[in-house]
Image (tube, coloured by chain):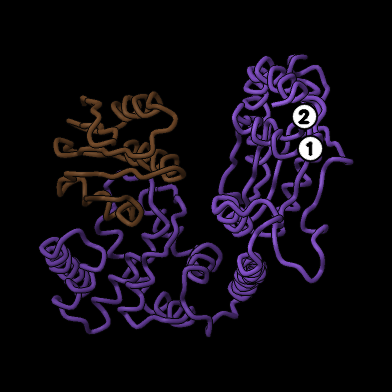
Amino acid sequence: MTINVENKDGAVVLVLEGRLDTNTAPMLEKTISELPEDTSNLVLDMNKLEYISSAGLRVLLATHKKISKVGTMKLTGVCDEVMEVFEMTGFVDFLIIE
Amino acid sequence: MNVKDRMILDDFKRERPNFLKLEEVASDRLKNVLKGSGVLITGIEHRVKSEKSLEGKLYKNGDYYQRLDDLNDLLGLRVICYFGDDVDRVGQLVEESFEINREKSSDKRALIKADTFGYLSLHYICSLPDNGEYPKEICGKKFEIQIRTILQHAWAAINHDLGYKSEFGVPREVTREFARLAGLLEIADDEFMRTRNHINSYANETREKIINDNADDVLIDMISLREYMARNRSMRAFLQELAGIEGSEITDIDPENYIIQLKWLKIETIGELQAMLERNKDTAYRLAEKVLKGSELDILSSNVALRFLCRAELVTGGYTEQQAAEFISLSASNKERAERQAKRLFNVYNEIKGAEND
């Protein structure tokens, strides 16, 4: 998986490409941990994310909990396969998906 | 400007960098103390007085100040709370965390005459604790901490910014208008506390009813649904069954957005939700098993219980596929997606029924 960090309209945008699984979730976790402490507007661009596993869900959950204290985390461009995972796990109920 | 005031001002210019250092240290200490306290505050303000402002203060107060040390508010910090009783809790924390000059500190709430309405705030004149933790150039320097509610703050800020800080020379009508507003806001502060206490009592009573399985008549709202999902034994057992499909851990998530979905299904009380659980849990489990088994998804939101129960209600409760799509569109990102999900839901249910008949 590759992760590109961009700044767009006051938001930190992480562009994810590939598979977010046990092997790659630590990479996303590390990238997020290195963002400025006061990051309050985080967007995960998932247009090119093909797959997400439980390890990826755990990173999203931890990031959601952290960011929601000070701002919002949005997911964009979620494909049907990834959306299905969010739905069957109930993650769709608290993630902000656009 | 007279010689005495000039000397005070010159002293302040020399000392200002130390006050700026003190501002950083004192505000950090205050923030840390409040952070761990659980008291809800809207914010902390702080500032070191400007030279111009000091000059104006010296001019207005004649001979009152003889030396720089006579001024207590060269550094000022302010804590703004939501509720009146939190002002006292913050005051207690300030007393425990800073050296307090009792003689100079004042509780304006207690000082105001019983038949007068006006400025209310708790003021402490403080210094840093003398425990060797801080540089000597800032230890012993006085500063003021004001604590007030957000409504008291609104009154004081508007009063100040409209230029009526001084009690002298203000037209009688203006004084009366501000007094009326102060009285109104004092009542509003009490009402906010009463409302918060009412919410806390309601949450406690609802929790007790749910724990004792005595909540059938309780209407579903964000408090009762949250308590039910967190504490009802049957619901927790059902959730554990779902978790068992893939050996998943459950992460508790606020179920608030299911209120509208339950309402759509005409489930309006905790008793009706409990009945829906009892009549649908087997179908809901099978629907969940169909999509989760083999997925290796070992983390689930606690809301999956409501998700699959609602879907079971759709397929067993006489709803059409079109109605199911309408229901799903309450939470789905778009209509087509909702229609696809509804279609798949009925297909999966028919597969389950077919397998049972075989």
The amino acid pointed to by label 1 is Ile
The residue depicted at 16 percent of the width and 44 percent of the height is: A77
Confirm or deny contact between disc 1 and disc 2 (CB under 8 A).
Answer: yes
| Left-right relation of B158 to A47 | right
Q: Quadrant of the C terminus of chain B?
A: bottom left
Estimate the x, y position of residue A88 in percent, counting from the top left: 28, 55
What x and y, as percent, mark residue B143? Answer: 73, 32
Q: Amino acid at mark 2?
A: Lys
Q: Which chain is brown?
A: A
Q: Is residue B240 above or below residue B143?
A: below
Local secondary structure at mark 2: loop
Pick whichever of labels 1 and 2 is earlier in the sequence.
1
Q: Chain of mark 1?
A: B
Find chain B in the image and tell me its colour. purple
Q: Secondary structure at mark 1?
A: strand
Q: Nearer the viewer, residue B304 or B92?
A: B92
Left or right? Give the position of B289 relative to A84.
right
Determine which of the numbered discs, if any, sits on residue A1 in the image.
none
Residue A25 is situated, as x and y percent measured from the top left of the image, at 32, 30
Residue at the image position 72 percent from the left and 47 percent from the top = B90
Q: Which mark is residue B142?
A: 2
- Residue under label 1, please give it: B125
